[in-house]
Image (cartoon, helix red, strand yellow):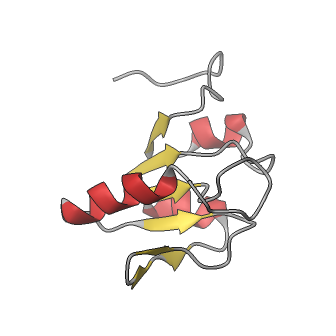
Amino acid sequence: MLLLGASYKPNIADTRETPALPVASGLLKSGADVVYHDPNVPEFAVGERELDRVERVEDGLREADLAILLQDHACYDPVRLVASRCLLLDTRGKLAGENIRHL
């Protein structure tokens, strides 16, 4: 499971009140393997557990079964996200209007 964006707002490093924390916490409690990508956040922990950071979003998308777009950072190109092989959950509405695969 790949979380895209760990910060509170786009294009910043501030993780206070980030939606990524409760999402990651719930996923971890359910037994999911969770990693994250955020160009602005070098470290991200859920309680005592430090999540692994994916350096290149392309690598993370290639390895993940599901990616959850939690923050719409400028580096997240909608066309590339939609073209990835993994399923995407867009919580930001960034992919609206893109050529989206429907289940």
**Residue that sits furthest to the front in the current view:** 17
- Can the viewer see residue 100? yes
Left or right, 98 with reference to 68: right
Q: Quadrant of residue 30?
A: bottom left
Left or right, 57 with reference to 29: right
The quadrant in which the N terminus is found is bottom left
**Residue that sits furthest to the left in the current view:** 30
**Residue that sits furthest to the top in the current view:** 97
Whether residue 14 is situated above or below residue 94 in the rendered picture: below
Residue at the image position 54 percent from the left and 23 percent from the top: 100
Horizontal and vertical percent position of residue 86: 44, 47
Whether residue 84 is situated above or below residue 33 in the rendered picture: above
Whether residue 7 is situated above or below residue 66 in the rendered picture: below
Comparing 11 with 32, the one in front is 11
Left or right, 81 with reference to 61: right
Horizontal and vertical percent position of residue 76: 72, 47
Residue at the image position 47 percent from the left and 49 percent from the top: 67
The quadrant in which the C terminus is found is top left
Q: Quadrant of residue 63?
A: bottom left
Count of numbered tags: 0
Residue at the image position 71 percent from the left and 62 percent from the top: 14
- Can the viewer see residue 85? no
Horizontal and vertical percent position of residue 78: 69, 35
